[in-house]
Image (spheres, grey):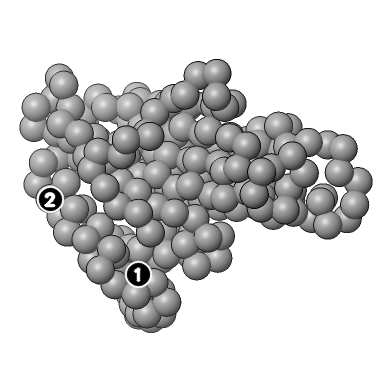
Amino acid sequence: MMMSEPLDNYGERAGKCEYLTLAFSPTSAPLRSRWRNNGLSADFLGDYVTTFLPANGTLPAFKRRQNEVKHAVTYIANELLENAMKYHQPDVEIPIRIHLELASDHIKVSVSNGVSVVQAGRYRAFVEHLREGDVDDLLLRQQEESARSTESTMSSLGLLTMISDYEAQLDWRFDIHPTHLESMTVTTIAILPLKGVPGASA
């Protein structure tokens, strides 16, 4: 699990990979009305990735691995969007963005959203807790806590699943917003290695 601030290789790398960015305004419509769109957007990104994976692999193992990559991207995108919407600062016009990069050996999915400075401090503490803990132990404790409580609290279950089930690397970036000085932009990045896919270098 990687955690740094700032992340040197964050951002679009035109000419070196395929990338796609989607964004929406959190104040143009109630966030609750967007929950269904989360799943649709995540499915779209999963399908989008498979169009760039080589189609010349006819062996069942290649096709199975392509489906695994599609499922992983869909899951990661959905979890990152859900967290961004759940903890976004209300009534502040900072777009929620999801950015996807497809390189030869990895896929990067990142989501950014606006938070208050106070909330950013809490989130930093949450990130440090993840960084210092054992992934398997944290995953077990989070599953137990989720089973006991139905409250919408800061949950690491989806993030830990990305690491344990999909071997994703996680990173975070915190930036002061240039026009909303009482707000920050938090970007959560998941890097998924490409293994066993035709044309991938790994």
Q: Secondary structure at mark 2?
A: helix
How packed is label 1: few (under 14 Cα within 10 Å), some, or many (20 or more)?
A: few
**Above or below — where is 11 with respect to 140?**
above
| Relative image position of residue 82 (x, y in whole percent) | 41, 48
Q: Position of residue 113 (x, y in %)?
A: 30, 36
User: Dot 1 corresponds to which residue?
Assistant: 150
Q: Is residue 37 left or right of residue 83?
A: right
Residue at the spot 66% in from the left edge and 53% down from the top edge: 195
Q: Which mark is in front, 2 or 1?
A: 2
Q: Is residue 194 shown left or right of residue 153?
A: right
Q: Amino acid at mark 1?
A: Thr
- Toward which corner of the image does residue 112 lie, by quadrant? top left
Location of mark 2 (residue): 121
Label 2: how many Cα within 10 Å (few below 14, some 14–19, many 20+): some
Kind of element beneath mark 1? loop
Amino acid at dot 2: Gly
Q: CA distance from mark 2 to mark 1?
A: 24 Å
